[in-house]
């Protein structure tokens, strides 16, 4: 007897299962081949975070744990071992750092999806995309983005680099200071510095030499600080230095002395030797509450102070400077209103021919009649220059002076030549000479009736070409030019030959040196002979004693001006002075009291 079972269904099922297994194996093989062919690193972890599948590219990212990477190993173990073996550039060597880093990385890993960038110890950058699937698997891909990162860093470096010196630029130093200020307890020093007399060097030695000097100074500054500190060029001849980790003024002072000392070693430029010097404005960064903008403003104020105090030095910022700046601003406002209210006055100081005793001219000197107080030009002219008010102010001085000159002539008096002081900003106006010519003809005066006084510093202005053009136009018009306060600035002999200057005014400090005890007035004597050899007249300013007047006359000084001869006079007094001079011939050394 035989029992027969119909096993078709079972065989069918077995066949299906075998087929399915073959297919699955084939599918798995195929999948593995695909995964291995993909250039990106692929890995998948199961619900227990154990490695399920990975490719060679994944393994190649982490050579330090290549021995560990195989199916079944946990994500945490790969990560910890790699960190401990120094696979990641961002993980510090100390134990606590590794623990903190691992904890952070595991938190990231737990997120459903995320993208992160990792830097490896060999300099490669990896971009990682992690995603948790619906059934709880963890799938990740990794791409090598090193080239992209290097390009990005190059672009960032270029954007933060000064092209002339190769130092950091303004953007970079601003970012650095912002980062420092973000610290809970910032510690550091911000120094803003400026090369002294850079304009003069640029002017006399040329722009190439100027550029070379900037490169040398930048290199010296960078050499005087640690690699971790920052030296940046802000533009022009301005640099900023950020030194980390300084809290005490004493330590700061040592660093500043070192900076100044490194910079001021002689430099050979186009055959000349220059000794560069810097002025520095300094702020200690110790409070978090300040903004980057505040900090740079404070450093600028301190620099302004350092320069005002005589350059070649450093000044620490203190709160009084802010107050002084605010006061300056409100004084400028006052001056603006004063000009609107017509509070500007002009006094006239007589000039006398020292050889003949004849009154030859007047110098117009501005005064600000602020209520009952007469403000000296020494305090308001700098404000006017700083704020641009010098233009309307200067125009008004010229107008008042010409009107006075014309009215004296109308009264039959002989005021002589009228000297008017002008600032660089006025000489830079395109229409300065045209306007002056119009004003002269309005008052029926000749160009020879006036003289324009410029100071030596005008000749060192950045816009010197414009100024030279104006001076040439003035000369062509027939107006004489006097170089004021001669000997105090940096005008060289080449300036005197280059510019059409008709007379030199010896600065009163050199006249003050002429004293019976010791002063034979060597400088005054030298200026007189220099001027005469160049065909110029000389005016001695600030003559206060008979001795000075006689000494100047003896050395051939042409004209004298000073309290001994007459102080500056208000218009009425000037008129009386001129009347008196018209009738009584006066010995030059005699004091005239109006
Ligand atoms: P500055 O052009 O060198 O004028 C001569 C200054 O010396 C005047 O000072 C005058 O009062 C003073 N002074 C005259 N004789 C003596 C003396 O015997 N002893 C002493 N110690 N001083 C004497 P002030 O009027 O205070 O003017 C100061 C400066 O302000 C002027 O120096 C000039 O550079 C500037 N300034 C005056 N008015 C104007 C102006 O209208 N425009 C411009 N841009 N600057 C002006
Ligand atoms: Mg003058
Ligand atoms: Mg002067």
Image (cartoon, helix red, strand yellow):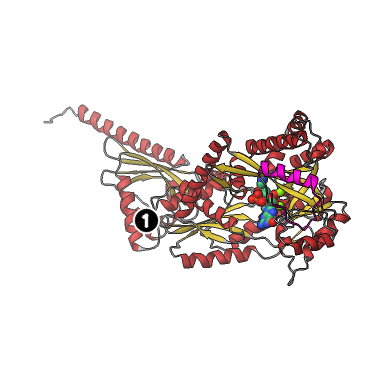
Going 76% across and 54% down the picture, which residue do you hit? Answer: 491
What range is drawn magenta here?
A: 570-594
Residue 395 in percent (x, y) is at: 67, 36
Q: Nearer the viewer, residue 126 or 270?
A: 270
Residue at 82 percent across and 36 percent down: it is 477
Q: Nearer the viewer, residue 189 or 398?
A: 398
**Residue 552 sits in which quadrant?**
bottom right
Q: Residue at coordinates 43% horizontally, 63% vertically from top-left? A: 247
Residue 277 at x, y percent in the picture:
64, 60
Viewer can see residue 398: yes
Name the residue furthest left: 1
User: Left or right of 486: which side holds 88?
Assistant: left
Which residue position holds label 1?
A: 68
- The quarter of the rendered structure image containing the N terminus is top left
Q: Is residue 13 above or below residue 242?
A: above
- Is residue 231 something one can see in this rendering? no
């Amino acid at each position: 007897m035989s029992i027969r079972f119909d096993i078709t269904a079972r065989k069918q099922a077995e066949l299906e299962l075998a087929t399915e297994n073959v297919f699955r194996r084939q599918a798995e093989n195929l999948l593995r081949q695909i995964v291995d062919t993909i250039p990106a690193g692929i890995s998948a972890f199961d619900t227990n975070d154990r490695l399920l599948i990975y490719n060679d590219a994944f393994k190649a990212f982490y050579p330090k744990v290549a021995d560990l990477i195989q199916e079944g190993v946990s994500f945490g173990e790969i990560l910890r071992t790699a960190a401990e073996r120094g696979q990641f550039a961002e993980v510090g060597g100390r134990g606590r750092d590794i623990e903190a880093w691992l904890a952070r990385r595991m938190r990231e890993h737990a997120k459903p999806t995320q993208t992160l960038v990792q830097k490896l110890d060999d300099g490669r950058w990896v971009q990682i995309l992690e995603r948790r699937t619906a059934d709880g698997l963890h799938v990740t891909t990794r791409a090598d983005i090193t080239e992209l990162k290097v390009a990005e860093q190059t672009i960032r470096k270029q954007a933060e680099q000064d092209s002339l010196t190769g130092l950091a630029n303004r953007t970079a130093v601003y970012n650095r200071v912002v980062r420092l200020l973000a610290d809970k307890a910032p510690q550091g020093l911000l120094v803003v510095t400026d090369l002294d007399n850079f304009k003069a060097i640029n002017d006399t030695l040329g722009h190439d030499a100027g550029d070379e000097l900037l490169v040398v100074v930048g290199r010296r500054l960078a050499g005087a600080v640690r690699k971790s500190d920052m030296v940046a060029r802000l533009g022009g001849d301005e640099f900023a230095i950020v030194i980390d980790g300084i809290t005490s003024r004493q330590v700061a002072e040592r660093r500043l002395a070192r900076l100044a000392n490194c910079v001021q070693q002689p430099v050979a430029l186009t055959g000349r030797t220059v000794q560069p010097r810097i002025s520095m404005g300094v702020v200690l960064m110790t409070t978090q509450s300040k903004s980057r903008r505040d900090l740079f403003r404070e450093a600028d104020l301190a620099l302004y102070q350092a320069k005002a105090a005589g350059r070649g030095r450093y000044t620490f910022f203190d709160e009084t400077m802010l107050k002084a700046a605010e006061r300056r601003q409100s004084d400028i406002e006052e001056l603006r209103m004063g000009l609107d209210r017509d509070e500007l006055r002009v006094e006239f100081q007589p000039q006398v021919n020292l050889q003949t005793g004849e009154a030859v001219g007047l110098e117009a000197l501005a005064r600000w009649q602020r209520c009952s107080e007469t403000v000296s030009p020494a305090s308001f002219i700098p404000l006017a220059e700083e704020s641009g008010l010098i233009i309307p102010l200067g125009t008004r001085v010229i107008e008042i002076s010409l009107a006075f000159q014309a009215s004296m002539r109308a009264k039959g008096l002989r005021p002589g030549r009228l000297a008017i002081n002008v600032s660089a900003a006025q000489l830079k106006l395109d229409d300065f000479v045209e306007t002056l010519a119009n004003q002269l003809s309005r008052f029926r005066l000749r160009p020879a009736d006036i003289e324009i006084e410029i100071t030596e510093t005008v000749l060192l202005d950045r816009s010197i070409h414009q100024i030279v053009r104006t001076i040439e136009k003035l000369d062509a018009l027939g107006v004489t030019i006097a170089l004021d306060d001669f000997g105090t600035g940096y005008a060289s002999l080449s300036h005197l030959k280059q510019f059409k200057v008709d007379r030199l005014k010896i600065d009163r400090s050199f006249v003050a040196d002429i004293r019976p005890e010791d002063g034979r007035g060597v400088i005054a004597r030298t200026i007189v002979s220099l001027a005469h050899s160049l065909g110029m007249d000389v005016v001695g300013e600030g003559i206060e004693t008979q001795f000075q007047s006689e000494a100047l006359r003896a050395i051939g000084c042409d004209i004298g001006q000073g309290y001994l001869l007459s102080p500056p006079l208000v218009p009425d007094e000037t008129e009386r002075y001129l009347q008196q001079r018209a009738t009584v011939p006066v010995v030059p050394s005699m004091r005239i009291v109006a």
